[in-house]
Amino acid sequence: MPTRILIPSGVLCLGFDHIALARGVANRPDLIAIDGGSTDSGPASLGAGQSKYARSVTKSEWRELMLARAEAGVPLVIGTAGTCGADACVDWMYEITVEIAAELGQSLRIARLYSGQPTARVAKAMQEGRIRRLFPAPEISAETLAQMTNIVALAGAEQIQAAINTGADIIIAGRTTDTAIIAALPLLRGDHAGGAWHGAKVAECGALCSTNPTSGVIQVDFDESGFTIEPLAEGAQCTPHSVSAHMLYENSDPFILYEPGGHLDVTKTRYQALDARRVRATGSEWVPGRYTVKLEGARHAGYQTTLISVLRDAHYVANAQTWADKLHGFLDALISKRMGIASDSYDLDFRLIGINSALGAMENRQGSPVEVGVLLIITAETQALASEIGKLANPHMLHYPLTENEELPTFAFPYSPAQSDRGALYEFGLNHVMELDDPMSAFRLEVTEVPA
Amino acid sequence: MTKAAEIAHKIRSKNAGPFWVTVDVFCGTPAAYTRLTTDLTTETVAALYHQPSQSLKRFEIPDLHVIKFSFPRPVVQGNRKDRDMHGAQWATLLAELDL
């Protein structure tokens, strides 16, 4: 059965074209799907179980989508709610939804899909040989699993289908694959499987697959042999090139995409321009495989304090690396002398902004910058210790001389106090998949009736 | 000397998940594609990113005039020693490569 999915944008909080959204609703979609996050911005969101986006923006955009849902009379699905899809983020999104529902006087059935994995479940799966490494994967053990503050599994189409089958008006899903929220309904209705996953992959970043990437709104029609994609903003176009090129994006292999229960292969896909704005794709293949879900986990990796000192004096700019190296040695000695702690209980990392701070050892260009920003990143086991080292480093980041017999230099501190406590540092600790006999065995569905 | 960016239409890089970086070279024309597939050897690109050649995945997509390189991140995204959270500045090394 042909299925029409409306995708308002690549991620909630990125904004969308309001007129295009209204056009999408008028086109009578079968479901509205939007992504709520990914690992794009790093491990902090998953580590802390918090959204990286502002609550105000989340609420304001979600309200618009809830109004669009009410008008269309179809389910609204958000995947990877609250950036990382941890259970706490699903609850955060649920709280916002209930708040808006009360303000709008909407009565709703809300399904929450939880993707959080208790350490014990993953440890048991490891004992049973159901955890497989992807490449490259960090070593894991029961001990390292216990260090994770959050572990999530990426839900696929099956778990979203289970949520759809509850008859929910709104589905707030924890971590899912970016594609699953779009592919679930077409697959449920028997549309072409290769087309469902491929169309979902192309549309998951919203209008990024079109000539007007910031306009957001995309509509995909799925059917028995493929999909047709159309951007809804005025003047935006999808071309065979823009659509086929999207498989390259944030994907290490441009032809293959792994999902729970198999993989998509677009090697033989044919792309056809239906007109100036619509593209049809056929021939994408879905290759069934073992039912595995990818795991993501983040663990505490200490606490950080940072300082920035700006060198403008030409002599110091020319010798910035030497200055930082000497200062590093000086601070190590001072920390040992004054604080009496071993050098392996903290880390000092100097980044020379203007020299090689983005690329480090890979940098192969040299220039003559006007000034150099010296960013000192201190990592230690506790915030108190990192902060104490920051205070110890402070006067030397300001005054450390290149030579002994010169007048004390004073560099530029951009603010006072010069040191900033960054809080906890998190690291990704899993690049593994977990095999499941029953797709729902690692996920939990909760359905709530919210009266107006 | 000509830089790769002067021949290609666009060169971009981005993480492909926290453990990989991928670099896409959009050549733009068949002529640029022919030239760049020849000049951007696996060894040259691997050396640029301090990778062993066997770690570098190379894809040539003639229909799109695209060459794509993917390799494991030497530092996992967001780890203490990471310098570019999104891996998007890595493209500059390839863009500035003298051919």
Image (spheres, rainbow, N blue to C red):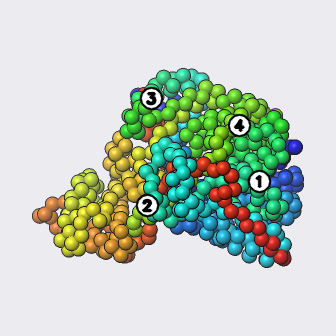
* Residue identifier under label 4: A286
Q: Is residue A260 above or below residue A329?
A: above
Please report, as a chain letter, where disc 3 is located: B
State the residue at coordinates (56%, 28%).
B60
Indicate the secondary structure of the residue bearing disc 4.
strand
- How far across and how far down the image is residue B74, in percent? 41, 45
Say whether mark 4 and mark 3 are on the same chain: no
* Residue identifier under label 1: A161
- How far across and how far down the image is residue A390, in percent? 32, 71
* Residue identifier under label 2: A143
Which label sits in the foreground, 2 or 3? 2
State the residue at coordinates (66%, 66%).
A90
Please report, as a chain letter, where disc 2 is located: A
Q: Is residue A247 above or below residue B29?
A: below
The kind of residue tagged 3 is: Thr
The kind of residue tagged 1 is: Gln
Indicate the secondary structure of the residue bearing disc 1.
helix
Dot 1 alpha-carbon crowd within 10 angstroms: few under 14, some 14 to 19, many 20 or more: some
Task: Locate residue B27 relative to residue A366 in the image: left or right.
Answer: right
Q: Is residue A58 visible?
A: yes
Whether residues under marks 3 and 1 lie with C-beta atoms below 8 angstroms apart, the answer is no
Q: Along the line of sight, which residue is nearer the eye, A294 or A105?
A: A294
Indicate the secondary structure of the residue bearing disc 3.
helix
Please report, as a chain letter, where disc 4 is located: A
* Residue identifier under label 3: B42
Which label sits in the foreground, 4 or 2? 2
Please report, as a chain letter, where disc 1 is located: A
State the residue at coordinates (83%, 76%).
A451
Whether residues under marks 2 and 1 lie with C-beta atoms below 8 angstroms apart, the answer is no
